Image (cartoon, rainbow, N blue to C red):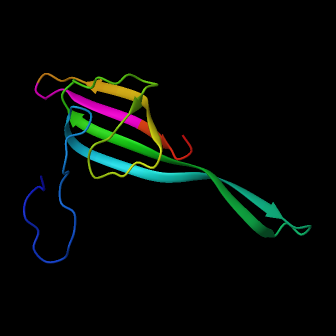
Amino acid sequence: MPCGTVRGSALTFGIDTAEASLTTQSMSATNKSDKKEARDNCGIVVAVAYYNLTTEITLEGLGTGISTAVGESITLSGSYDEAGTTFVDEITVDWANEEFAKVSVKMTSYAGI
């Protein structure tokens, strides 16, 4: 369900779906690839190849109910469109005496898997 009502430009506001059984607070995705450059005899780049497309995803939420472990695949349910299979790289849980438990999940989505 959309968060709030946006007037004017068609912009995205808020997070539309809870992810990984957490009350999602933020989410980011960075598209990346490996790059190989070919240079001529003067060292000038004459061709470039991009390969091994991946997306690094970070999810922050409240709660401790994530059921996926490091190294397992995970399916995201919200607005992020996964292109391939996503694996959990790291899970961090933070507790404090006057805060809700917070979880940070770092994932990598591999386009070729």
Quadrant in the rendering for residue 13: bottom left
Position of 25 relative to 5 (above/below): above
Q: Residue 66, percent across and down?
A: 27, 26
Magenta-colored span: 98-106
Horizontal arrangement in the rendering, residue 33 relative to residue 27 (left or right): right
- Residue 45 percent across, percent down from the top left: 78, 68
Question: In the picture provided, is 86 more to the left or to the right than 26?
Answer: right
Relative to 98, 33 lies left or right: right
Q: Is 71 included in the stretch rendered in magenta?
A: no
Residue visible at 19% across and 46% down in the picture: 17
| Nearer to the camera, 111 or 34 | 111
At x 22%, y 24%, the residue is 64
Q: Is residue 32 left or right of residue 99?
A: right
**Quick one: which residue is furthest to the bottom in this view?**
8
The answer to which of 7 and 93 lies nearer the viewer is 7
Residue shown at 18% from the left, 24% from the top: 96
Please state the total of marks drawn on the protein image: 0
At x 36%, y 41%, the residue is 58
Residue occupying the far right of the picture: 41
| Viewport quadrant of the C terminus | top right
Q: In this view, does 65 lie above or below 86?
A: above
Q: Where is residue 80 in the image (x, y as percent from the top left)?
A: 33, 51
Q: Position of residue 106 (x, y in %)?
A: 40, 36
